Image (tube, rainbow, N blue to C red):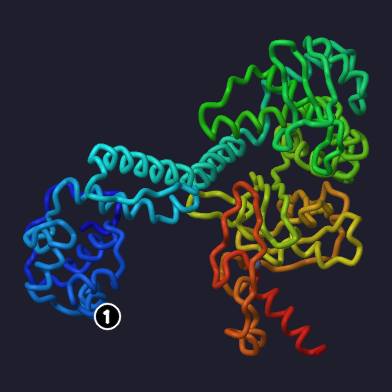
Amino acid sequence: MNSSPWILPQTAPEAEPFLDSFGLGRRLHALRKARGLTLAQVAEHTEVAPSQLSMIENGKREAKVSVLQRLAGLYGTSLDEIVSGTPDHRTELEVELDAAMRSPLARAAGLPSIRISPRTPTEVLEAMVALHRELARQAELRAATPEEARRANTELRRDMRARDNYWAEIEAEAARLLDTVGYRSGPLSERMISEITAHLGFTLAHVGDLPRSTRSVTDLRNRRIYLTRATRPDHNPRSVLLQALGDHVLQHDRPATYGEFLRQRVETNYFAAALMMPEASVVQMLTAAKAEKDIAIEDLRDAFGVSYEIAGHRFTNLATHHLGIRMHFFRVHESGTIHKAYENDGTPFPADHTGAIEGQVACRNWTARKIFDQADAFNAYHQYTDTPEGAYWCTAHTEATPAGRFSIGVGVPFNTAKWFRGRETRNRHRSTCPSPDCCRVPPSELMDAWAGQAWPSARAHSHLLATLPPGAFPGVDETEVYAFLAAHHDSA
Ligand SMILES: [Zn+2]
């Protein structure tokens, strides 16, 4: 029979030679399983030792015709069917259903199984086989989603890069709304946010039981936006509300594909940022800072009362379009996993076969990771990094979250570092990634001491787009593990 229980042969296979003991063994095994019999029970009926039967089923021993005849009688089939391997429709159904009911998929779903007997109606078998095939098909669809998600994300980033991450239409919508509420300069006040909400015809409700999986819920019929009363560490309440309004202003329909869902999220985030950090005000401030050679992301953060991440990300919207500065942006977990990344300056971010950067591991020598070695975790860290694509200067901060520490930063090509505060740093590192001897293979002295002697267990990370990076232990940084072992071994 076919190796996959889900696929029936398209055409009846040619009668196999009598001596194909493997195929014969598999058929006998399947027939026995389909009838729910143990080797011992079969041995009793056929007077062949269980160990002999097992060898026959495994194709390690040829069966005598007399034994096959007894087995055919016991299994309610013909010798011809056992030997030729062309079971009838009903036997096929029985074998397929038996395999499906025992599959890890069915067991994980907690599906009860039935005992297949000669009295089980064929149409019941047909219906159950169809259900199990559908279950397997659905599982395959779900398994394909992360791949689809990565492709959609890659496509979106390509689009963002092509427009230098500047969305003129969204800037215009934001400017129009800011105008209606009389915004002039500086941060957007709570009062103005309330006025924008009212202007768009919405009311607000803060509740204690907002679904954990949501940031906000909008009641479209009653034009009411529900927000959580609780403070969630990763949620800025102002941006959550503005994002909810963004879905309305940008006339988003229910997304039909994952790519559409991602695009809408990017657009609503952009909309919220464009209101919290209005284009005209930010550009005015950046232009003045550039003239002073004193651009700093933390100044944007402080001037507009937003997080460092929102300030850094907003910088990517406006710096190329208005100041002609090309740059990259990153958010990297302390484990090295890249959670967010954007570049239009040629930074050689690692990528998987779909082109996705998220989920890949950043070079150990980059600012995004070197920053975790700094004693002072709260001030800006600056670094020049020489890469195969040229030299870059980066500025970054760390942020502590319940999921661990993250580095967030912005970088520019060497020749534009002159506009930025922190350009005089003496921190300089060399990265030759993706060359394996840059940072992926542990240093030889650690390798010699510990290779083959470590059995680490990876921390599971749940980031939607994260894929486990390849390696002996997926998701585990061997250099770190070996260095850890070396340190603890020495102190023992
Ligand atoms: Zn590296």
Q: Residue 190's x, y, as percent?
A: 92, 23
Total tally of numbered discs in the picture: 1
Quadrant containing the N terminus in the rendered view: bottom left
Quarter of the image for residue 299 reads: top right
Quadrant containing the C terminus in the rendered view: bottom right
- Residue in the picture at 43% in, 50% down: 106
- Residue 448 vs residue 28: left or right? right
- Residue in the picture at 87% in, 38% down: 231
- In the image, is residue 181 above or below residue 90? above
Q: Say which element carries label 1.
A: helix
Label 1 environment density (alpha carbons within 10 Å; few <14, some 14–19, many ≥20):
few
Q: Residue 457's x, y, as percent?
A: 64, 70
- In the image, is residue 483 above or below residue 282? below
Q: Residue 431's x, y, as percent?
A: 66, 67
Q: Residue 416's x, y, as percent?
A: 76, 49
- Residue in the picture at 67% in, 54% down: 338
Per the image, the residue denoted by label 1 is 51
In the image, 197 versus 492, the foreground residue is 492
Confirm whether residue 279 shows in the render: no
- Which quarter holds ligand 1? bottom right
Quarter of the image for residue 215 reads: top right
- In the image, is residue 130 above or below residue 97? above
